[in-house]
Image (spheres, grey):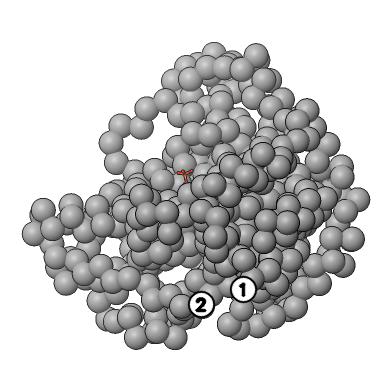
């Protein structure tokens, strides 16, 4: 559905229900444990049988090191790694996967991937007086590496100015108008998030590109979007996409940095140091996960997540005991409201969030309840805590409705 078009969550849910029943059956952990309901998919996603099978098959037929042997298992493992690099490019809609210019580097997850961009790319070419724009209320993994790069550069006598991306107060979206004022002739880099891990909102990256102009490199933290909705590097016009395999149905310890490597926007990313043994079994799981996601349809998965989040948001926002964080509506029916993707975070006005997390578990729901690693929050301050409900393709309407009725009785 194009951005800005009002969605109809109930119609969406009706249309997608038959598809979803078949999808849910493919997750052994979910079918084996229908209760408590797993509503913490933004923390990590459950794995479909196809991914478990790919892991088993790899370890029982081909397990060897990659790029280091001349016998069939080693050759198959090397081929797997190279095939999966290519698969990641295709999955992300790389317009020119064969060009040899763009590259995919395997990392252990988004945290390591963003650090790789910061240490092995950003610090290599900035000069005294350059400016970078970074988010200060997104995940800490998308702030600390840029501050580390600033420190490393300062140690070499290169003074870089770090500016915070401006946010809109009520929606949690970036403030694209104010952003235009924060961009100057020395802006050399912008780090953004695709889907906010607390607010669930689509951060409207296309507007960031419009505000910063065609040549400033943009790095996208796609931890909450890859595997949850279609992600196209062509449409987003970003220079780096970083994601975690474990949130995209693959094994933990797997992730990737896609780099456009457009010389007009900076040097090529060359991850530094000796690259040791890759996480081959993780890469096998990632290949299977991307195949599974394509077959299931990232568009349908995205619409399902949006519709479920809309249903919960619309139910909660009429209960005065709850404060929903971020945008108060679920759907992007044009600016300034954002589309919410599969994540709803809230606080109860009287029940501390960690208590609410325990109460919800006692009623049969696994949710996240803390400060959610958000930059700028104090983890020891209970006021910064919140409860996050996050869904994936295996989550049912019934689970969301059951949660809604428990939350209503606690209101
Ligand atoms: N960025 C965002 C938006 C996230 O949600 C997360 C995970 N919560 C991360 C970065 C870090 O991902 P990982 O822990 O897999 O490295």
Tell me: 212 left or right of 98: left
In this rendered view, identify the residue nearer to me: 84 or 171: 171
Is the N terminus in the top left, top right, bottom left or bottom right quadrant?
bottom right
Q: Quadrant of residue 304?
A: bottom right
Mark-to-mark CA distance, 2 and 1: 8 Å
How crowded pointer 1 is (Cα within 10 Å; few <14, some 14-19, many 20+) is rated as some
> Looking at the image, can residue 320 be seen?
yes
Q: Give above or below for 88 relative to 349.
A: above
Q: Quadrant of residue 92?
A: bottom right
| Residue pointed to by mark 2 | 170
Number of numbered tags placed on the structure image: 2
Q: Position of residue 336 (x, y in %)?
A: 58, 82
Q: Which mark is residue 118?
A: none
Q: Position of residue 21 (x, y in %)?
A: 87, 45
Q: Quadrant of residue 186?
A: bottom left
| Residue pointed to by mark 1 | 328
> Looking at the image, can residue 347 be seen?
no
**Which residue occupies 42% across, 54% down?**
382
User: In what element is the residue under mark 1?
Assistant: loop
Contact, CB < 8 Å: mark 2 with mark 1? Answer: yes
User: In what element is the residue under mark 2?
Assistant: loop
Tell me: 46 left or right of 210: right
Is the C terminus in the top left, top right, bottom left or bottom right quadrant?
bottom right
């Amino acid at each position: 559905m194009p951005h800005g078009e009002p969605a109809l969550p109930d119609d969406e849910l009706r249309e997608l229900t038959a598809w979803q029943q078949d999808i849910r059956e493919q997750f052994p952990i979910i079918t084996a444990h229908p209760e408590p309901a797993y509503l913490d998919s933004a923390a990590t996603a459950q794995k479909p049988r196809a991914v478990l099978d790919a892991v088993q098959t790899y370890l029982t037929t081909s397990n060897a090191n990659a790029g280091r042997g001349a016998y069939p298992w080693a050759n198959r493992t090397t081929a797997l790694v190279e095939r999966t690099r290519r698969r990641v490019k295709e999955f992300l809609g790389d317009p020119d996967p064969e060009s040899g210019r763009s590259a995919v580097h395997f990392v252990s997850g988004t945290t390591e991937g963003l650090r790789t961009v910061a240490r092995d790319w950003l610090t290599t070419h900035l000069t005294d007086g350059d400016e970078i724009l970074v988010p200060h209320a997104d995940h800490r993994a998308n702030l600390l590496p840029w501050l580390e790069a600033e420190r490393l550069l300062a140690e070499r006598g290169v003074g870089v100015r770090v500016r915070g991306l401006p946010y809109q107060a009520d929606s949690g979206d970036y403030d694209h108008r104010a952003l235009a004022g924060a961009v100057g002739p020395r802006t050399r880099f912008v780090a953004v998030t695709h889907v906010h891990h607390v607010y669930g909102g689509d951060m409207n990256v296309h507007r960031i590109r419009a505000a910063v102009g065609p040549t400033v490199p943009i790095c996208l933290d796609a931890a909450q979007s890859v595997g949850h909705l279609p992600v196209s590097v062509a449409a987003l016009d970003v220079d780096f996409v970083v994601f975690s395999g474990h949130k995209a149905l693959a094994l933990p310890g797997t992730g990737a940095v896609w780099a456009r490597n457009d010389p007009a926007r900076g040097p090529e990313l060359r991850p530094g140091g000796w690259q040791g043994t890759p996480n081959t079994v993780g890469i096998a799981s990632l290949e299977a996960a991307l195949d599974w996601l394509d077959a299931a349809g990232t568009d349908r998965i995205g619409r399902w997540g949006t519709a479920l989040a809309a249903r919960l948001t619309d139910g909660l926002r009429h209960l005065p005991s709850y404060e929903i964080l971020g945008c108060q509506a679920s759907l992007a029916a044009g600016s300034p409201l954002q589309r919410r993707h599969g994540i709803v975070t809230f606080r109860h006005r009287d029940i501390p969030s960690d208590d609410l997390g325990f109460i919800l578990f006692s009623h049969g729901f696994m949710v996240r309840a803390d400060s959610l690693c958000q930059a700028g929050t104090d983890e020891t301050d209970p006021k910064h805590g919140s409860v996050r409900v996050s869904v994936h393709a295996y989550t049912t309407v019934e689970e969301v409705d059951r949660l809604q009725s428990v939350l209503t009785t606690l209101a």
